[in-house]
Amino acid sequence: MMAQSTESVNDQCTLERIFDERFGFAERERLMDMFRDNWIQQRDWDLIESFGFNVVRLPFIWNLIEDEHNPMTLRSDAWQYLDEAIQQAELRGIYVILDLHGAIGAQGWEHHSGCANKNLYWSTPEYQARTEWLWRQIAGRYKDRAAVVAYGVLNEPWGTSEENLALEAIDLYHAIRSVDSETIVVLPGHAAGLDAYPKPEDTGQTNVAFEMHFYPGIFGWGEIGEAVHREWLDCGEDGKAGVCEWHKKLTQLNAAFLIGEFQPWTGLGQELGANITRETYDRYASYGWAATAWSYKLISSQGGQGNGTWGLVTNAPGDGLLAKADTWACADWDSELQNACGGARQSFTPNIQTTETYFLVVKFGSCCEGHLDVSLDNLSLIEESSGRELVVNGGFGSSSGWQSWHHTTAPNIEFANTTAELQPTGAIGAVLRMEGAKAVNGGIYQPITLTPDQGYQLSGVFKDNGSNNAWAEIYLVDRAPTNGEDVLAKSPFAPIDFSTAPLSDIEALFRAFGNTPYDVHQTVRHALTITADEKTVPIDNSTPQ
């Protein structure tokens, strides 16, 4: 979620352990508070409201509430962050679902429980008892808080059987009901479904909802694209699968339903991703289901919404990255640079105090047994006040003005290519083509002189010629590329080594989460806030079967 995952640090428990070993427990707690204080601020709540949402699913880990050194004892600051979130939600008329995302011992093998490869919750009665205790504390505090609409007792608890999950989840239901008789209790589905649960009314349970997470196109569920969402939302070829099948299941259980996580916009492009997101919300609402997408915010080292990241909000593109496309975001692209699907800038003003020399870099590459084949033409960088063109030979009729470089294996660089099928839309005459197989990464560059307080306009066209596992990027960097070194955008979110990074660097990273300029997924926000008759792509509004 914060662009820092590595092989050595890929979960919260590992990060906390490193902080403990390097700085001590008290300093670890200060750093985690610094992270939380900056990750979600008032501007984030304002943005959440601007999307028209009326409920948030608020994930938290057990040691936010329980003193990890004193079992079944509240931390002195136990309610600091939940109280603040609930208050911000109340101010905006938004409900809150409290989601125990990570239970003590970890309820699955995955990193999202907080501790990857652990899964000790199910084999440790003490951990189960402490989780029941934890929910009694939470329910006791928030049972009369109108904004707290539900308790999600365990997130994705897939480290046990369906039958055992149902038994333990119902135990958590009873722990909550011992202090709170009204607030909805959300019982989690297994990866295999809900079949192990009894009908709530048959066992005397009240105000119960079930929860599942649906990710068409992701995690082995087909491929990202309109087809997989259409099949899911339109109930498959026979009209009985997809959401219709789940509607039938919930009708039989006679219970409410929360789709606690889903991701309908990633990798689908701006307009299509927005329309499918709106259609998904509308279809779920037509059944009376609550739905909370994952996720509101995601940070990346490159920044930018591109073709749809996992965040409705992400950081703006890093300094130096002018345009990017890749085959993961939008294979077979053919576009202007200012519409590049992986991130783009049409205009910018550099943050410099004196006239300086920068380097305009064209970088193409591929990995993972992939193949690169990309064309580029009409590359231009105009100084807005004077109309002066800064790029020498942006038409690529020859190699004049350009120098080559490579990080790993150099791609084949071909100037003055006139093959018709390789011409990007809008190209004029000869184009630049780069191609290569497997692990190639490199390109061309030239010096560019930039002046303080001047705005600059980027343009050009580029085209993917059937590549796979490949990318195309345009950068502006402050030193000439060197063979053997990669070219990357300057970013406060470049991965750091938490095991060795100075404390000041860790603090700077955490502060950057709070002050980085955002790139908001504007087309999704527009799609979610317009009325039904304003939608550009109407959905099938027939009565659910």
Image (spheres, rainbow, N blue to C red):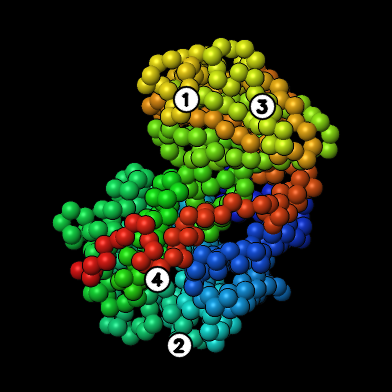
Q: Which mark is residue 427?
A: 1
Question: Mark 4 vs mark 3: which is more N-terminal?
Answer: 4
Position of residue 36 measured from the top left corner of the image (x, y, whole percent): 67, 61
Residue type at numbered disc 3: Glu
Position of residue 231 measured from the top left corner of the image (x, y, whole percent): 26, 53
> Residue beneath label 4, please?
290
Residue type at numbered disc 2: Ser
Q: Is residue 508 left or right of residue 166?
A: right
Position of residue 345 measured from the top left corner of the image (x, y, whole percent): 60, 40
Classify mark 2: helix, strand or loop: loop
Classify mark 4: helix, strand or loop: strand
How far apart in space, not on screen, are marks 1 and 2 (Cα)?
A: 68 Å
The residue depicted at 62 percent of the width and 49 percent of the height is 315
Mark toward the viewer: 1 or 4: 1
Q: Nearer the viewer, residue 519 or 99?
A: 519
The reply to whether callout 4 and callout 3 are in contact (CB within 8 Å) is no
Mark 3 surroundings within 10 Å by alpha-carbon count, few (fewer than 14), some (14 through 19), many (20 or more): some
> Residue beneath label 2, please?
181
Question: Mark 2 vs mark 3: which is more N-terminal?
Answer: 2
Mark toward the viewer: 4 or 3: 3
How far apart in space, not on screen, are marks 4 and 3 (Cα)?
A: 53 Å
Classify mark 1: helix, strand or loop: loop
Classify mark 3: helix, strand or loop: strand
Residue type at numbered disc 1: Ala
Looking at the figure, which quarter contains the C terminus? bottom left
The residue depicted at 53 percent of the width and 34 percent of the height is 337
Mark toward the viewer: 4 or 2: 4
Q: Which quadrant holds residue 159?
A: bottom left
The reply to whether callout 1 and callout 2 are in contact (CB within 8 Å) is no
> Residue beneath label 3, please?
389
Residue type at numbered disc 4: Ala
Mark 2 surroundings within 10 Å by alpha-carbon count, few (fewer than 14), some (14 through 19), many (20 or more): some
